[in-house]
Amino acid sequence: MKRRTDRKRELGPGMQVFGRLAKNKAAMAGLLVLSVMIVIALLSPWIIPYPYEALDFSNAFAPPSPKHWFGCDDLGRDILSRVMYGARYSLAIGLLAVLVGAAIGTVIGSVTGYFGGVIDNVLMRFLDILSAIPSILMAIVISAVFGAGFSKCILAIAISTMPQYARVLRGSIMSVRDMEYLEAASSINCSNMRIIARHILPNSFSAMLVTATMNVGTAILMAASLSYIGLGVQPPAPEWGAMLSGARGYIRDYPHMVLFPGIAIMVTVLCLNMFGDGLRDALDPKLKR
Amino acid sequence: MIRYIIKRLLWMIPVILGVSVLIFTILHFTPGDPVIMILGRDSTVEAQAQLRASMGLDRPFPVQLLSYLKDVFLHFDLGVSYNTGKSVSEEILFRFPYTFMLAFSSMLISVLIGIPLGVIAAVNQNKLWDRISMFIALLGVSMPQFWVGLLLVLLFALRLGILPPSGIGGPQYFILPIIANAFGGIASMARQGRSSMLEVIRSDYVTTARAKGVSKTGTIFRHALPNALIPVITVAGTSFGRSLGGTIVIESVFSIPGIGAYMISGINNRDYPIVQGCVVFLAVTFSIIMLLVDLMYAFVDPRIKAQYVSGSRKRRVKNEKKDR
């Protein structure tokens, strides 16, 4: 009986959140642009105007024109096609890095938050050590170890951002730990795993969701930086950071090569941040991060 | 308070030790043999074995780890570069001023410009100025730092020709790197400052102050601002970490011979002592700054100060009760 009313109450705020989110114009605009970008990324092999890896030396360094909207790079490759195809890399890295990082962080955060005591102490001290290294530095070291590449870049970003999720989750678990419904759950002989998965995580979900949404943008920025210094996705793959890295030598004479991939990164992250801000305000107007 | 400082300082030791162990272990098990890197693939096995023995790389892992830790913590010696044979510590100390200058002034600028922007935006909530500055701040946190750097070079160095594009020299060489590195920080501080200020403005004591007749500016400066700044200070610490990390990439954009450039050269040459040394050194710097920020936090917030000065025993008892 009690459980049913609980369910009902859970659904109510959920719908309220959607309502608030839908009213937020900036968040909806961000979501719209993001959706368009995701569609472009998914369909890119079929809709890009030129093959993204096709060399055409007669068009090398061609400035933006009706034929090549974003111009061409040093090898005559169409930059618009490369930017469109490159959306696959950036979006995939952003989403997967956050998923992997949040998954590891969830496990660590829920264990340390729920059990407390010695386990909490040991794990938190380990996270202290990880957090003593700024995350981009950590990502650089990890990708130096694993080597460059798409999947390794994801792993590097996931590991270096993992402590954040663990901390956020631990914090919100601590705040619900002494609630009566958890005592009730353990009194009817729920296992620890079940209490964590069914009762604690859903209640700590909103803080995690906001952190994760915001971090997709951060992950994309980090991936671009890694590629820029030559440690992330490697050229000739049209990842945006790698394109910027290849273009830096030509910045004086052909600024369009530097401009468009950067704008692509900026727009993507901007939309993610607008959506994330909206989500944060919708979930809890008082929640700051 | 002093006990708290000492406790925090002592706690730094295991953290730094942990960082060193972690980084050494990670890099130790990285594929790629430094001996073959130095001698080349077609060197004789004897020569390889001899070099390996002279570099101490033939010893078992725990022995190498212990001797590394001993060198670092007892002699402040971060080892020598595999390729050049030069002392890593010396090189880092030589390069440190550039990196620290860059990171510290970026943090300072982020705080000094970002917070006032955020506060002004919060005071004028939902007015045009608020909308515009918050949109710019949102743009700021959405741009990759190195790209901001490239754009600044393009505009101020290559088009207008008023500032040098890269390298080091007089103060004018540092203007663009600092702006590029601080840009994201300014934006995120402005956002933090705004939300923190908004929260305070809505609180009861601000309403009370207004009701008893204090002018609007008076309330903001006397009542709201001090309280709004407290959470922002913690963010300043993370902001320093961000600047320090950003410096690594910015140095590569502007060809500044700082620690970041040194570390990346170490990574590219598989010169692990360099990488280890740089990471440990940057982690120590970061921890010290975080400690200073925490102390400042305790210093400006009387509630937290009170906890550490008199309440440490009380707090422990309370925590124990809670744990039970």
Image (spheres, rainbow, N blue to C red):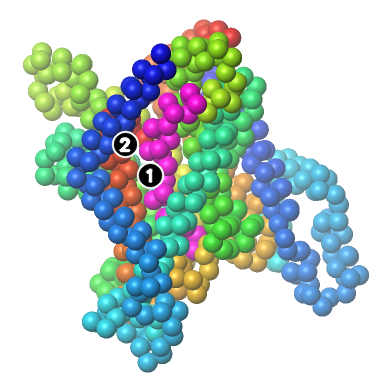
Q: Kindly indicate the quadrant of the structure image that contains residue A277.
A: top left
Quadrant location, the C terminus of chain B: top right
Q: Give A84 or A211, whichever is nearer the viewer.
A: A84
Reply above or below: B107 against B214: below
| Crowd rating for badge 1 (residues with CA inside 10 Å; few <14, some 14–19, many 20+) | many
Reply above or below: A217 against B250: above
**Which residue in the structure is indicated by mark 2?**
A280
Q: Which residue lies furthest to the right in this view?
A: B46
Residue sitting at x 89%, y 65%: B50
Tell me the chain of label 2: A
Residue sitting at x 69%, y 53%: B27
- Could you say which disc has been placed on residue B295 in the image? none
Q: Do the residues labelled 2 and 1 touch (CB within 8 Å)?
A: yes
Tag 1 secondary structure: helix
**Which residue in the structure is indicated by mark 1?**
A214
Specify which label sits upstream in the sequence, 2 or 1: 1
| Crowd rating for badge 2 (residues with CA inside 10 Å; few <14, some 14–19, many 20+) | many
Q: Is residue A158 visible?
A: yes
Tell me the chain of label 1: A
| Residue B134 belongs to the span the image colors magenta | no
Q: Give B258 or B268, whichever is nearer the viewer.
A: B268
Residue sitting at x 53%, y 69%: A234
What secondary structure prevails in the magenta region? helix
> Which range of residues does the magenta coloring cover?
A198-227
Kind of residue indicated by mark 2: Arg
Kind of residue indicated by mark 1: Met
Q: Is residue B236 left or right of residue B229?
A: right
Q: Horizontal and vertical percent for residue B94?
A: 57, 56
Reply above or below: B312 against B272: above
Q: How far apart are marks 2 and 1 (CA)?
A: 9 Å
| Residue A204 belongs to the span the image colors magenta | yes
Reply above or below: B212 against A281: above
